[in-house]
Image (tube, rainbow, N blue to C red):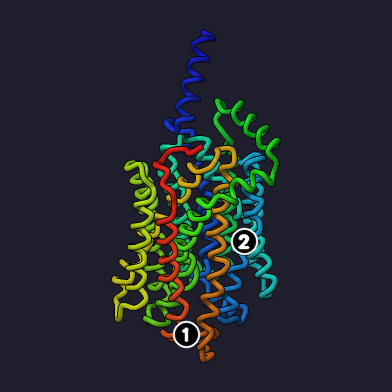
Amino acid sequence: MSDSSDSMVMTNATHDELGLGLKPWLVCFSAALFFFYEFIQMNMFSAIDPDLMRAFAIDAQQLGYLSAVYFYANVIFLFFAGSILDRFSTRLVILISLSVCVVGTFAFSQAHNYYLAASFRFFTGIGSAFCFLSCIRLASRWFPAKRMALVSGLIVTMAMTGGMVAQTPLALLVDHAGWRQALVYDAGLGLLILIIIFFNVKDYPASQASQNYEEHKFLSELGYWRSFKLAYLRLQNWLCGIYSSLLNLAIFLLGAIWGSLYLMQIHHFSHEQATYPTSLIFTGTILGAPIVGWLSDKIGRRKPLMILGAILSLILVLLVIYAPNLSLLSYSLLFFLLGLTTSTQVISYPTVNESNPKMITATAVSVVSLCCISGGAIFQPLFGWLMDLSHDSTVVAGVHVYSLHDYHMGLAILPIAFLVALLAALLVKETRCQAQH
């Protein structure tokens, strides 16, 4: 009886470890709800930017800084997040960081001073530095390498669903309840997710306890700076980070903050109508990320899809910027396709996972996350600064109104970014979906 029980436990553990049972999916996608929640916080300005301009009497550049301070916090804390996750309980780190995000979101909803609001936005960004890294670390423990691209794609799909919720659904809630009350509800959603994670997330399968002990022992002997250098001095990690960061700018610039305002002010769509295309850029990524991940695993290659994604994204963004007199349906289709093609950025994560020793997974992936978040921190305020360069200071109902030329100045960032992303993809070393260490 004892032998039979032991055999059954070992079989279940093996199935869990291989990602064949329900447990790995429950663990990883409960944790991915944190990523879902953070993408709501990251992208919510698209739905509330006119309200914020009125509430704090600010222009495009100031709005860009208010959004970007979230990314500044990410950049600062990402330097430590990887090493913290490699050395401490992933579950505990998630619970603490999500709690910080929820408090920051609620406090932001109550702020009546621009600088105080920026401080709370920064506070929210601190917690979110840990969300994606924790998901990838859990996935690397609960799933085999051959499934990492698919699982990474599905995790990103969860995040993009949050980004989509931050568009039309949040805009409708803001129209109904006001932006402050909408963010109070947002904080309540964070509390619910915190409870789900508390009951479902475990650090690793029971069968990996001894392996986890050995990895921590090795990391302790290796030391922080040596493990940091292993990850941060590897060119492959930076090439993947640059690629992912620059393709993500479609989300950070069009989806998160400027897309709906551009469609409202230049193409004269209503607030609700303008959120349809920005929602669809997230929908495209929601569908594209798991498809691209599955296809990459299926063909056993990483580079070809990365190169193709950069080329198609460049073509599409040129149409978004320069094609004249398009209908709402045409913009919706273009934004959807742009989300679909830029979803190839998810391939960066399994590529980095395969290019580095397993015990520094979170630290290595933090290089990609650092690049991505730096993109938002740098280019959101830069976009606003470029628009303000030739702005004639026209203000209507407390909202700054910009011309087509102003928007073209800011949007020029995207085609340049996609060209650089293409170059990075060409330089990445192919892993053939196999661990290199």
* 25 and 298: which is toward the camera: 298
Instruction: Write down the residue under mark 1.
Output: 402
Secondary structure found at label 2:
helix
Q: Which residue is mark 2?
A: 105
Residue lying farthest to the top in this orientation? 1
- Observer-side mark, 1 or 2, equals 1
Give how far across and how far down residue 97 sits, in percent: 64, 51
Residue 158 relative to residue 104: left or right: left
Kind of residue at disc 2? Thr
Of the image marks 1 and 2, the number of the one nearer the N terminus = 2
Position in image of residue 145 (x %, y %):
45, 37
Measured as percent of width and height from the top left, residue 265 is found at: 42, 82
Three-letter code, disc 1: Tyr
Up/down of 183 relative to 54, above or below:
above
Between the C-alphas of marks 1 and 2, the distance is 29 Å
Q: Quadrant of residue 251?
A: bottom left
